[in-house]
Image (cartoon, rainbow, N blue to C red):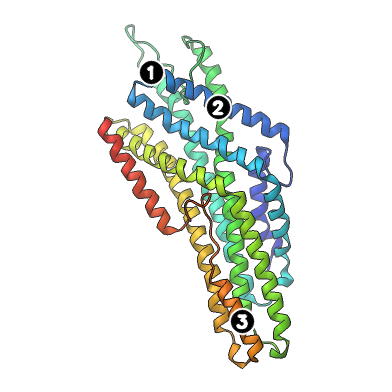
Amino acid sequence: MNMPEAMKVLTWNKWVLEFLGIWPSNESLFTFSFFFFLVSMATCFVYADLIYRISDFKYVVENLTENIVLTLLCCKIGLYRLNRRLMKEILLDIKMDYAIELYNTEEQKSIFLAYNRLSKSFIKYSVTTTTVATVLYYIQPLMDHANSHRKLTENSSITYILPYHMRMSFNITESSLYYYVYAYEGVLVPIIACGYSGTDCLLVTLTLHLCAQISVLANQVENFNGDFRKFHSHLKQVVTKHSRIISLSVKLRTAFAYFLLVQLVGATLVVCLAIYNLLKNYATGHTAQLFGFIFYGSSVTVQLLGYSFIGERLMTESLKLSDAFYNCKWYVLSPIYVNLVLFCILRAQVPLVLTAAGFCTFSLQSFTDVVKTSMTYLSVLRHFV
């Protein structure tokens, strides 16, 4: 078992979040403040533009499409900063699980590595799709500007469209000023890509790590083949490890409670607006923008599916521990040990869950509910057009 290879998943998370200064083990107040100030100012400018043109419904939809993303980004990195101590405790605690001597059989090692590979796959996909969607959204106005240059005639004018609808105190009438402002908005691209995907990746990594530890523990309980005269000490170790997992789960749920609530509400609106813009551009023939909204919508949808999947896996694995206790050879034990196993079964029947501040439990069923809600919002939007 190659533990340094398995620990790469934490290194990848560190690279993304350290860029924004919000990696819990190596936080930087200056870096965080600088990037948070840039995003906050951009969000305020976009809101100012929304208020200025509030009577134009089509423009309001376009503005909200990016405004929600910037608002979510501010909330996500801000909540990471507020909960940094709790997340630092979780990260320090799980590092001990990468010791090879904790896994007694090849099956237990393969269980741990399978969840580790799943975390790596999610990070690769999430960072890639979010980066591509952000870059495509950013360069699209520049491509339209270049096309307007080629089609320029004596009676036509050049369009100066920025990627983010910010309300400026001046009008852009020259190409040089346009390029300066465009370059300024380009600073937001890596912040959005890292902040939006990186915060999700750490949550998925930590939750899947918990799932792996629960699955390994269930395997150890069900396949215990040692001396049953020493079952009491073995059961004590199992209960201690299970209590530690429950404690980690409570910390994780507390640290990400409002983060998940913000993400759930915002992502529902983002999916709705992405589908709306996709259909609108297809109907009006603006096919050049289709790819950007496809990546935009798919990346957010996959992130929601990722939340729902890890929530489902956490519940499933925690309930499997109850079955593992029942399937062990409890029938050869003395009555006092049978009662202890019974208490373990009862405790394991309480599933570990991820919730959005207690309002919603993340599962595959909740994912379908979010999709249905997005479709409802979309049907309401269509009536205004």
* Numbered disc in front, either 3 or 1: 3
What is the number of the mark on residue 341?
3
What is the number of the mark on residue 186?
2
| Amino acid type indicated by mark 3 | Val
- Quick one: label 3 or label 1, which is nearer the N terminus? 1
In the rendered image, which quarter is residue 161 located in? top left
The answer to whether any part of residue 187 appears in the image is no
Crowd band around label 1 with a 10 angstrom C-alpha radius: few (<14), some (14–19), many (20+)? some
What residue appears at the point 48 percent right and 18 percent down from the top-left corner?
Answer: 167
Q: Pick whichever, 135 or 385, lies toward us.
A: 385
| Quadrant location of the C terminus in the rendered image | top left
Compared to 135, does 320 lie above or below?
Answer: below
What residue appears at the point 40 percent right and 37 percent down from the top-left corner?
Answer: 293
In the image, residue 228 lies at what x, y percent? 69, 89
Report how far apart the C-alphas of labels 3 and 1 lie in the structure.
74 Å
Report how far apart the C-alphas of labels 1 and 2 lie in the structure.
21 Å
* Numbered disc in front, either 2 or 3: 3
| Amino acid type indicated by mark 2 | Gly
- Marks counted in the figure total 3
Crowd band around label 2 with a 10 angstrom C-alpha radius: few (<14), some (14–19), many (20+)? some
In the image, residue 247 lies at what x, y percent? 66, 61
* Numbered disc in front, either 1 or 2: 2
Compared to 119, does 243 lie above or below?
Answer: below
What residue appears at the point 57 percent right and 24 percent down from the top-left corner?
Answer: 41
Circle 1 — which element?
Answer: helix
Instruction: Tell me if 304 is positioned left or right of 247 in this view.
Output: left
| Amino acid type indicated by mark 1 | Ser
In the image, residue 111 lies at what x, y percent? 59, 70
What is the number of the mark on residue 148?
1
- Quick one: label 1 or label 2, which is nearer the N terminus? 1
What residue appears at the point 68 percent right and 70 percent down from the top-left corner?
Answer: 241
Report how far apart the C-alphas of labels 2 and 3 lie in the structure.
59 Å
